[in-house]
Image (spheres, rainbow, N blue to C red):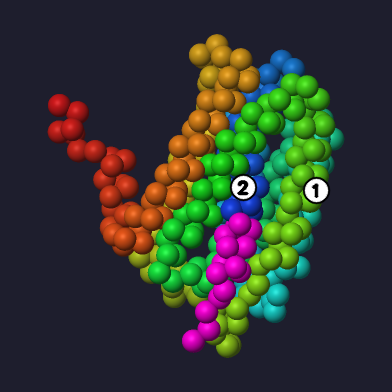
Amino acid sequence: MWRPSRQYQAILLLAGFTMIFHVIGINSIYGIFQEFYTSSSTNIEDARGQDALVSLVGTIGTGLTWSGSIYANPLFARAKSVQPIMLAGVFIMSMGIVLASFSSRLWHLYLTQGILYGIGAALYYFPVLALTPAYFDKHRGFALGLILSGAGVGGLVLSPVMSALITKLGIRWALRILGAWNFVMGIPVSLVVQKRGSIYTQGRTTRVDLNVAKRGTFIWQAFGAFLQAGGNVVPTYFLTTYAVSVLGYSASKGAVLLAIYNAVNSVARVAMGVLADRAGRQNTLIISVRRLYPSPASHI
């Protein structure tokens, strides 16, 4: 039976962590961009004071990142190597961020920091998440938890860094630096990931199976995932704006608040992965939902 080397497992974990650091980390700090775009200092005139319309930019980017499996998974299921797909994703994602720095109208942001970024992020994101579990067995939950913790660490690091860059260099150069950094760091990550032939059986179709899509189990699971994803990003988008506009904090303090949120999120992801390995994935899911929605008696 083939087993991956410990060295490659460690490299794959580092690559996955870095990828999540980029993609979800950038998604989670969109609130900093939103706070700037809607402020009096904005470079997007028709975005001033338009919180809902500006938040739609981040929603498009994040939504395309997560829903991109519809087109990303069939691509790398057919491909002999996922590396060109991931490299294309890094380029498109980074180009969207850099082109956003030249935006002067809100619809420019929809096309760049929303659509282009989201499409590229999906191509970069899904190969790692889909292929990594095949290289782990006993500690699969821990491995995925460690990789996904990159989201919290990314938000923790990028939040104060981007806030400082916007303050010192302006929004345009902050975006250009972010895009260039993302491109440079994304290249080695893309070259690390390898596709094992045993992951996809020979002759497996990548077309949509309507019979599966019509099943009640699939519909309810998709609906639940949709609600989870939608509710998950709302606090990250509006936390900084709320801290500045309502609580009266400075933009830098608002960024620190967002960083703390992401730090806690990072630790929790690893902990839930370890718990999933020991207690089981379904049990861990039930426990997390039970703690999220305590019984009415707990408030008495």
- From the top left corner, tell me how far across and down residue 143 is, in percent: 48, 60
Task: Tell me: residue 146, above or below residue 215.
Answer: above
Q: Which residues are magenta?
A: 1-16
34 or 268, nearer to the observer: 268
Residue type highlighted by circle 1: Met
Name the front one of labels 1 and 2: 2
Residue 107 belongs to magenta span: no
Q: Main secondary structure of the magenta part?
A: helix
Helix, strand or loop for disc 2: helix
Left or right: 210 with respect to 283? right
Task: Tell me: residue 190, above or below residue 249.
Answer: below
Q: Which residue was labeled with disc 2? A: 21
Q: Residues within 10 Å of mark 2 (few under 14, many from 20)?
A: many
User: In the figure, residue 34 lies in which quadrant?
Assistant: top right
Residue at image point 81% right, 38% down: 176
Residue 282: which disc? none
Residue at image point 65% right, 36% down: 158
Residue 9 belongs to magenta span: yes
Q: Which residue was labeled with disc 1? A: 95
Task: Tell me: residue 246, above or below residue 262.
Answer: above
Left or right: 244 with respect to 169? left
